[in-house]
Amino acid sequence: MYEIINNIKCYAPELAHANKDFPVEAFEVLYAAEEGHFWFESRNRVIQHLFSRFVGKDYAADVLEIGCGTGFVLKGLSEVFPQYRLKGSEFICRVLLLRKSDYHRLSLFNWMLPKCHSGSPLTPSVLLMYWNI
């Protein structure tokens, strides 16, 4: 079951607004720094190359990024592979809104992986998956 918050499907609504480990303000700084920064731009080019090589440019892939942050990787994929169906998940909804207004074709939602044995949630920094249904 999910709750709609700011037009985003939230499967973990208790985490949708804030988190002590990842303050929303930090994501806003990150969002402002990503465009044109050599690290983020280079990482996107590597990811785009890997998708081009292993998935293909003509393939209409379904792509899910778990832990999409501001959506910068998905933005890069959408520019190079417009035929891909892109989805992104981040647990703080306000972070998702940073990119949502720029890229309407991204499907973004709040979701949290189950807790691991230590009790902390499993949230990979970047996990990209593709599938064909």
Image (cartoon, grey):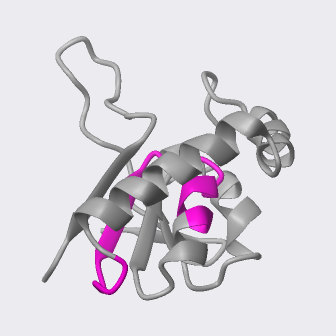
Q: Nearer the viewer, residue 11 or 31?
A: 31
- Does residue 50 appear left or right of residue 130 in this picture? right
Q: In this view, does 110 lie above or below 116?
A: below
- Does residue 23 appear left or right of residue 88 in this picture? right
Question: Which residue lies at the image location 25% right of the left edge and 29% below the top edge?
Answer: 115
Q: Nearer the viewer, residue 80 or 101?
A: 80
- Does residue 119 appear left or right of residue 75 in this picture? left
Question: Which residue lies at the image location 30% right of the left edge and 68% below the top edge?
Answer: 1
Residue 126 showing in the rendered view: yes
Question: Exactly how many numbered labels are in the figure?
Answer: 0
Q: In this view, does 13 lie above or below 9?
A: above
Q: In this view, does 36 lie above or below 119?
A: below
- Does residue 52 appear left or right of residue 28 in this picture? left
Query: Would you say residue 92 sits in the magenta stretch?
Result: no
Question: Which residue lies at the image location 68% right of the left edge and 72% below the top edge?
Answer: 100
Residue 91 showing in the rendered view: no
On the image, the x and y values in percent for residue 6 come to 66, 72
On the image, the x and y values in percent for residue 58 come to 33, 86
Placement of the C terminus among the 4 image quadrants: bottom left
Query: Would you say residue 68 sits in the magenta stretch?
Result: yes
On the image, the x and y values in percent for residue 14 come to 50, 46
**Image quadrant of residue 40?**
top right
Q: What stretch is highlighted in magenta?
A: 57-76
**Image quadrant of residue 26?**
top right
